[in-house]
Structure formats: structure tokens, C-alpha cells
Image: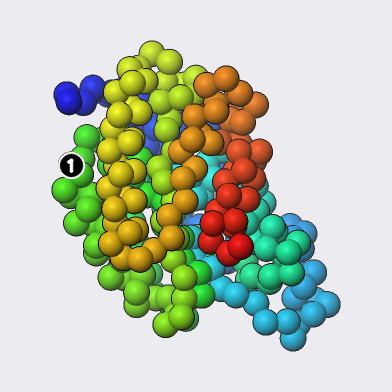
Amino acid sequence: MQILKRGIFLSIFLLSASCETQNSSDDQIITNDIEEDSSKLNEIDINNSSVSKFSFLALGDSYTIGEGVEESKRWPNQFIDIAYEKGLYFEKPKIIAQTGWKTYDLLNAINETNFTKKYDYVSLLIGVNNQFNSRSIYEFEEDLDKIMDKIDIIRKNNGSTIIISIPDWGYTPFAESYNRDTISYEINLFNKSLKNFADKNDIKYVDVTEISRKTLNEDNLLASDNLHPNGLMYLEWAKKIYEKWID
């Protein structure tokens, strides 16, 4: 199917010029160096320093860094809050993600990162910018194999990985002037490839795409840019990811 050209949207979607939020520094890779305000995890560190905590590495793009929301509302941060409430303790997640990243951008960032330890849990949510930029499924799948090779090196031998489906931005108000059917069709193709990749590598897979499609009728689930999820939707993702990954 002929993929529509979206020149004007490109600069907005990839650079997130419309977002004036806590993610004010474009081109920033989120790492553990950022201070948390008053997380439950810090309380654990202070009061229960002997508690064994799991390490968590989250890889992705704007949906993992949480474009448009404060740090505590990103889905990886809400994920570890859910785990804490259920008696499972995680360190603050290390996030390697940036708005606009395609699979090969993420792969380059992983190659340039000096990992000082291996991780118990690794998540991967990537591909929306491959779809948007009309990159081929073949290239996408090649990059996924390379990323998986890297994940195998940086996770512990008994570590766990989960693949998260690509959300459907075509259901957001921001996309109202574009062909929603075409966007959804392409997102479905990429997600089918992701699911096949997960099955082939015996990796857990969780579908958050259907949750993302609720925004067509529930704009209270969106950030101020009318494109990215807000904390409420990320909480729904975090709950579903936890149920699929941990429970």
C-alpha cells in the first residue's frame, strides 16, 4: 500500500516541538543519573537497604521516555511502583530512549552506552518512527535481530525480556487530518512482525495498541500535545505489562 507523505507532521512528531513539558531537553537520553523527587523506591533504599532489588532497563522511543509527562508518570516508573505495591522491589529503571528514534537509532545508542552491569529485566518498545518514516519491514526485522543480540549480552543469564506493541497514533486527535485507516494498517503490520519476532525468540509480548486506540473517544488519556499518552494511559500500560510480564 502506498504510504502517505507527512512532511509537516515529520518535524513535529520526530522533534516533538509541540511538547513543552518536563522533557524540555530534546535529544536527551534518559539515564539513572536523574534524581527522583520522592519515590517509594527511595523509601525502600533508606529504610530497607538490605532488601534485594531487581534491575530494569527500558529501551525505546518517545513512548518509553514519556514525551509530555513528568518522570514519575512514565510507564517504566509506574511499573516499578506497581511492583512495589505487590511486594516486588525494583531499582530505579535505566531508560535508553529518545523521541523520534527508529530501530537503528536505538541500536546505535546501545552500542555507544557503557554498561556497567547486567539487568534482570529488559523491555523493548520501538518501531513507530520506522512506520512513520516509511522504513521497510525487512529493515525493521533486521534491526530487531541486532538489538536482540545486544539485549542477550546486557541482561543476566536468567534475565527476562518483554516486547511491547507499537501504539496507534492514528487514533489521536493530532492525526485527524491524516488517513487513520492507512496508519492503523501499517501499525498492524509492524506489530505482526514484532509478535512473530517475540514468538521466534521465546520472548513475552504485550499488546498496548488497543489501549492506545481508546484515545479516539477518550482524550483525557492524552498529553497536552494531543499525540502522546498521559500518565493515566501509561498507568494502564504499566498494569497490563506487569500482569503479562510478572504475574
| Label 1 element class | loop
Quick one: 189 or 144, which is closer to the camera? 189
Would residue 83 appear left or right of 197 to someone viewing this image?
A: right
Residue at 20%, 40% in the rendered image: 135
Q: Position of residue 148 (x, y in %)?
A: 31, 66
Q: Tell me if residue 61 can be seen.
A: no
Residue at 23%, 57% in the rendered image: 143
Would residue 160 appear left or right of 51 to someone viewing this image?
A: left
Quick one: 127 or 25, which is closer to the camera? 127
For residue 4, above or below residue 132 = above
Q: Tell me if residue 153 can be seen.
A: yes
Examine the image and state in which quarter residue 113 appears. Answer: bottom left
Residue at 58%, 64% in the rendered image: 246
Q: Quadrant of the C terminus?
A: bottom right
Q: Position of residue 133 (x, y in %)?
A: 25, 35
Q: Position of residue 226 (x, y in %)?
A: 53, 25
In the rendered view, how is the structure colored?
rainbow
Residue type at mark 1: give it. Ser
Q: Quadrant of the N terminus?
A: top left
Residue that extends furthest to the right in the rendered view of this protein: 47
Quick one: 182 or 117, which is closer to the camera? 182
For residue 12, above or below residue 153 = above
Would residue 171 appear left or right of 20 to someone viewing this image?
A: left
Residue that extends furthest to the top in the rendered view of this protein: 177
Residue at 41%, 25% in the rendered image: 170
Residue that extends furthest to the bottom in the rendered view of this protein: 50
Would residue 161 appear left or right of 215 to someone viewing this image?
A: left
Q: Position of residue 203 (x, y in %)?
A: 39, 63
Which residue in the structure is indicated by mark 1? 136
Please rate how many residues cluster around mark 1, counting C-alpha atoms within 10 Å: few if below 14, some from 14 to 19, many from 20: few
Badge count: 1
Quick one: 66 or 232, which is closer to the camera? 232
